[in-house]
Image (spheres, rainbow, N blue to C red):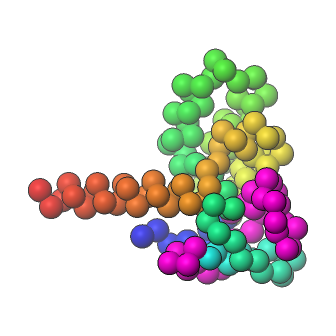
Amino acid sequence: MEELTGKLVAISPSLANDPLSKQGKIGIIAMADLKTDTVSVGFSSGEMGKYSSDALLVLKDKRDLYQDIMTGVSDMDSNTFKQLLDINMKQEHADYGHQLAAMNIALNSPEALKRSTVSLEHHLSINQGNEISHETSFER
């Protein structure tokens, strides 16, 4: 299972009920209990919030995002295309500064956000499926 502690996430701007009112803000996962679907997210303000995995957004895998950009170029405007390429280029760097900049670009454009992120819940289900298929291929 993927290590989640320290991963950058954005609180979904469409989250209806957030006691901290952090919709559209970026935080870092401090703890995750996937059995209860409770993810503790820390913010630069020092506040800590608890969210379900479907309320948190992560950037798509850089290879998947690049493929989506190239196959979807005909149905997006040039500004969205540039933003997505910029996000993708920043993903080439593993440091927090580049990852934070990529997430900020996504959050500043509803179309880029929709195209470049997935919920943490979806991300975990994809990774779990990949791990299972990877394990099965070794068992053969």
Q: In the rendered view of the protein, which quadrant contains the N terminus? A: bottom left
Q: Nearer the viewer, residue 17 or 113?
A: 17
Q: Does the magenta stretch include residue 19?
A: yes
Identify whether 130 is placed above or below 89: below
Q: Work out which residue is located at the far left of the displayed protein and give it.
A: 140
The picture places residue 81, in percent across and down from the top left corner, at 70, 29
Identify whether 100 is placed above or below 82: below
Q: Which of 117 and 95 is in front in this view?
A: 117
Q: In the rendered view of the protein, which quadrant contains the C terminus? A: bottom left
Identify whether 39 is placed above or below 10: below
Res. 86 visible in picture? no
Which of the 4 image quadrants contains residue 39?
bottom right
| Residue at 67% in and 57% down | 57
The picture places residue 17, in percent across and down from the top left corner, at 82, 66
Which segment did they paint magenta? Answer: 9-37
| Residue at 50% in and 61% down | 124
Res. 73 visible in picture? yes
The picture places residue 61, in percent across and down from the top left corner, at 53, 49
The picture places residue 76, in percent across and down from the top left corner, at 70, 24
Q: Work out which residue is located at the far front of the displayed protein and give it.
A: 17
Q: Is residue 40 left or right of residue 63?
A: right
Count of labels in the image: 0
| Residue at 78% in and 59% down | 15
